[in-house]
Image: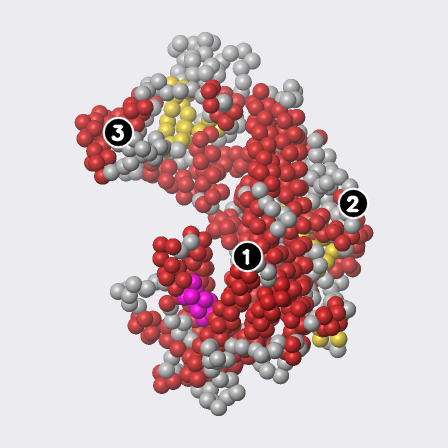
Amino acid sequence: IKSRFYNTSDRPKSSLPLDDVNVAEGCGELDVDVDIEPKRKKRTWKHGISSVMPRWTPLFGSLLEDILLREADQASLGLILHLGHHGMPCDEIATDRAPSTLIITHTNGIHESKVHWCACKGCPSRVSQLVRAGLFPATPENPESAFTIKLLEEFHLHTLTSKKSAYDFFKALYRLTNNAFPDDVPERYREFNIAVRIWRHLTMVKRSGQAHGIDTLVPHRQPGSLVVMCPTCPEPEFNMSPGWKHTPTSMSYIHQIQLGADGNFRLQKKTKRDDPNDRSLAPGRSYFADENTFKLFLAKYQEEEAPETCSGFRAGNMQRATKFKNCDVTGVVAVMCIRHGIFRRGAMVDLQKGERFCHVDFALAAALRGCDQLQDLKFTYDVGCQYTIHLKKRWMERFPEQYESMRQLNVLLLIKYALNFMKGAGLSHGETVEHPWAENNQAGPMTREMNPGTRHDTLDDLHGFWNWQKVQGISKFLFRKSNEALKARALTADLFEALSQAAGEKLVVSWEGMDTEPRMINGKLESVYRLTELVVPSVGAVFQQLRKIEITAPLDIAPVPGTLPSGSALFLKQGLELEARIFYLKKAAAHVASSGELASPSDVRDLAAKRRSLRGDLEVWRKRQALLLPELVKSVSEELIDEDDEEYGLPETEILLLPSDTPARDRSPLLWLMAKDEIKLREGRAYDLLGRVRIGIMHKSAFVQFKRAEARGQGANTRAQAVVDKASANVKDIARLYNINQQRMLDLGMNRNSPLQYINIEKDLWMKDIRPATTLVQRVKWFRARADKERSEEEVNILHEEFQRTMRSFSRMSEHWKTLGQDTKHSAGKRAYALGRSWMYCCMKDEAKNLFASLDWSV
């Protein structure tokens, strides 16, 4: 940090000529064209490794001697480390006094060293002497082992980024010390675990400002907090605009906080003999709730069962009962902000008997602390339909002190419709709570073996690192999201305007008077955003019917002959979804290939990302396929491998091996049963695609009419024509996908006289007059288009305010750290660190300010 405070003119300059510096770095002399800028140096094969090696070869002998000298132990060479006097001997030590032996572990191995402790009157403790020399003791009393600060910093960063365990890290250190006889190296693994745990805790205390007493500057926050706070979420008395409480009701959503809950069953803990005295070093001050408080709360609700009415949860509970049979902790549940993906203090708890509502209630109550002044709050949960039952009653019983504030906050649980149709939700999707699990699940194998306190401290550290990465990138994240929202606002406005003109003023006026709130009528959910049940099948309806058949069957017995195994319906449905993704991926690959060198970098990156995503989902699906159809996979997979094919290995070239991929003569009895279900799903899919084709034609016709009526001038006509062309290409793609599905149904034995027939891409995709087609389907599309337009406008407004809150947060944090850095009651080291943090937040504020100013919010 200090180097960044230097002015360019103040930085020390090398005394070596430029050519000597290049030679010292092994670069050699470089030819530079006169007409080219000095930074653009021309390299040729003449300046490669072959030109450098002759200079190194004569030095090989002396280099080897130096390397071998390093292999000798420091103590055997007579090196003595003097502590307390900057490396100089202490005058109070007798000349005949023998030095102490200290085992020092560094990044290059474990070494036996000799040390002399300072013996001056009033000298610092031995622990302080070691730390000031860059060494961390393994014990606070009479330390005989120490670890360099550099080692602890490197391991800490390694375990945060790659989830490397201390065991594996230390095994490498043993071999770095003595690769021939690693068992002869002094054993310091246990001491290392203790030092690392303390180092983690001290680092969190330092970075949170608790070591400096930052609580006095932020009295509105819970005292003693070690969490990395979200700079963008609304925090009264810290980052909100003056007078925010007087914001009009129609715009109050810009000050909302959006939370989400989710369970994770990978971060479990095994049943084993634990240290009964092992406790977290910061109970309740970080992301996990205080263990003692939570246990007392949980003891009151031991009889509460996990929700089982949802089919997916029922199957999940059966799997968890066997998979986590020997686990004290079967996973965790967390509540976090879903706008920015940042964990909240105390809003994570361990699970013992599945994901029960008492766990979620406790985590949500912790996440809501500090939100009592906010007027708008949204909360998502994948089983919200059940969670809301008796919610007020549970809250009154369990958290009476928060009940009134919860009612005043108007908590909205998203159970009746998607976020797309909820006013004030913006473009949030609610799945952000899933994102950190993929990263932190890598620590599962390491933390499941730990004692309870160590496990909590380790996971708290990992979650803090996740939060810090989010904070570091929040400005760029908001900038990217703002660009996307501004573009979406323009596109959705054009679509809604085109659909409104196509429908006509009379219909639009009648639709605008309709109630958009969903209602339960005769046990069925009715909404303007939802189509009522149609006489034709759909993929969703067929899948639910097949799924019900599977769920009613007992889960603990094997399928009887003549029936399909459980999971077949989901397997087939996912197969159809993968088929569609392969279709569109082939199109994207063909576009990039046809563009050649002219292909844009964004198209190339998007293609690579789609391939990675499809490859991962294919691998998961293949595992399910191997369980359901092992014989088919075994007999056919080898025949499909052709490594001489240039396209071998690309996910879009894979054959899915669905029943429709297998000739009728080669189908086993099981495949014939599965083929019957596949044709049912494909029939539903055919009607779904026909509906999309019909709506697509309506959209295209509406765009054409809009272009004729509104587009004036070359620029406007060009933009309008681009929208028309895109809509036309979209309709053709859907029609081609329908034809592929049609051919598969014929392969499965569909009657050729079926009402479902091929679409002629060139002749059938038109509509003479779209006005008579404005039926229920068109009305639903109009309402959805209006909702998309409103959500895009809301997203722009939300992001505008989030940028402002982020800049205020960074500015306040910079001011607070500067205040701490100027406080003379702190030591020089504390003041220097605080000023460095102040400068860091100042730079983060400037980054957010510059990105915010570069956006055209009026577009």
Considering every residue shown, the one lying at the far bottom of the view is 753
Residue 356: x and y in percent read 65, 60
Say which amino acid is labelled 3. Answer: Glu
Q: Residues within 10 Å of mark 2 (few under 14, many from 20)?
A: some
Q: Which mark, by number, is residue 29?
A: 3
Frontmost residue, 143 versus 581: 581
- Distance from the alpha carbon under mark 2 to that under mark 1: 43 Å
Q: Is residue 528 visible?
A: yes
Q: Please give the count of numbered marks on the rendered protein.
A: 3
Q: Secondary structure at mark 3?
A: loop
Image quarter for residue 514? Answer: bottom right
Q: Which residue is mark 2?
A: 245
- Distance from the alpha carbon under mark 2 to that under mark 3: 66 Å
The answer to which of marks 3 and 1 sits earlier in the sequence is 3
Label 2 vs label 3, nearer the camera: 3
* 582 within the magenta span: yes
Q: Which residue is mark 1?
A: 715
Say which amino acid is labelled 1. Answer: Gly
Query: In this picture, is 617 found above or below 371?
Result: below
Q: Residues within 10 Å of mark 1 (few under 14, many from 20)?
A: few
Say which amino acid is labelled 2. Answer: Lys
Q: Which mark, by number, is residue 730?
A: none
Label 3 vs label 1, nearer the camera: 1
The answer to which of marks 2 and 3 sits earlier in the sequence is 3
Frontmost residue, 246 versus 438: 246
> Is 111 left or right of 735, judged from the image as shown?
left
Q: Which residues are magenta?
A: 578-589
Q: Which residue is rendered at x = 77% and y = 69% of the image?
A: 513
Q: Which residue is rendered at x = 37% and y = 27% of the image?
A: 112
